[in-house]
Image (cartoon, rainbow, N blue to C red):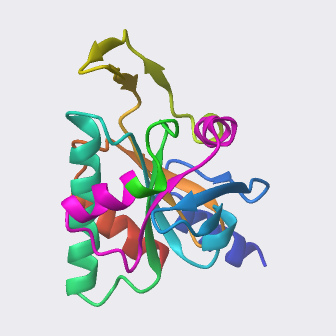
Amino acid sequence: MLLLSTFQSGCKSDFELNENLKGFTFKLVDQDGKPVDFPTQFEGKIVVAGFIFTHCPDICPLTVNNMQLVQKELTKNGDGDDVVFVAISFDPERDSVALLKKFAGMREIDETNFRFLTGDKKITDSVMSVMRIVAVPEDSSLVEGDISYFFTHTDRISLIDQRGFLRKEYSGSKANMEEIINDIGKLK
């Protein structure tokens, strides 16, 4: 029994985090309007989660692109069946289901295992709190009659294992795809 314990804790040393998210279920909706219970719905799969808003001019498109590159590499190698990619919007007031679908289409995302999630603001704020993501709205202005604003926000991709434990965090816009792919391999 001691040998098994030592071996298991040795395996966990590859990851900086081991935070249990199992006690949390957030009712969100994906880019197709389908309800999603995050993260419980993905138990049994590895989750690569990013946090975005579609009006972002820089960090968020880079984060989604980096997640997409990891997805493509895993698919190419036949290793993507047990991995789900999730981009959660922290701007649900503007990021409607239709806008998330358009955002995915413009980027030619393979939606087979890539979900864009939004929901009630209180719920998305709760997800962000649990995942330690901060998004602070900046000053707003009127652009062609519409209020325009951006966020200063955490730049992060999170890795959640099959049991619902947050295992590692990466810079979203500057993610090292090889590192993420290797870490996914360690969880299999």
For residue 60, above or below residue 14: above
The location of residue 74, given as percent across then percent down, is: 27, 79
Count of numbered tags: 0
Indicate left or right for 36 with 2 as reference. left
Magenta-drawn segment: 99-128
Judging depth in this view, the residue of 132 and 33 nearest the camera is 33
The location of residue 57, given as percent across then percent down, is: 21, 33
Indicate left or right for 145 with 48 as reference. left
Residue most toward the bottom? 78
Residue most toward the front? 145
For residue 109, above or below residue 146: below
Residue at x 25%, y 65% (from the top left corner): 105
Dividing the picture into quarters, in which one does residue 44 lie?
A: bottom right
The location of residue 7, given as percent across then percent down, is: 60, 73
For residue 170, above or below residue 33: above
Judging depth in this view, the residue of 12 and 154 nearest the camera is 154
The location of residue 150, given as percent across then percent down, is: 34, 23
Indicate left or right for 155 with 121 as reference. left
As for residue 3 lying within the magenta part, the answer is no
Dividing the picture into quarters, in which one does residue 173 lie?
A: top left
As for residue 113 lying within the magenta part, the answer is yes
Judging depth in this view, the residue of 34 and 180 nearest the camera is 34
Q: Quadrant of the N terminus?
A: bottom right
Residue at x 47%, y 82% (from the top left corner): 82
Residue at x 49%, y 66% (from the top left corner): 47
For residue 64, above or below residue 109: above
Dividing the picture into quarters, in which one does residue 124 lie?
A: top right
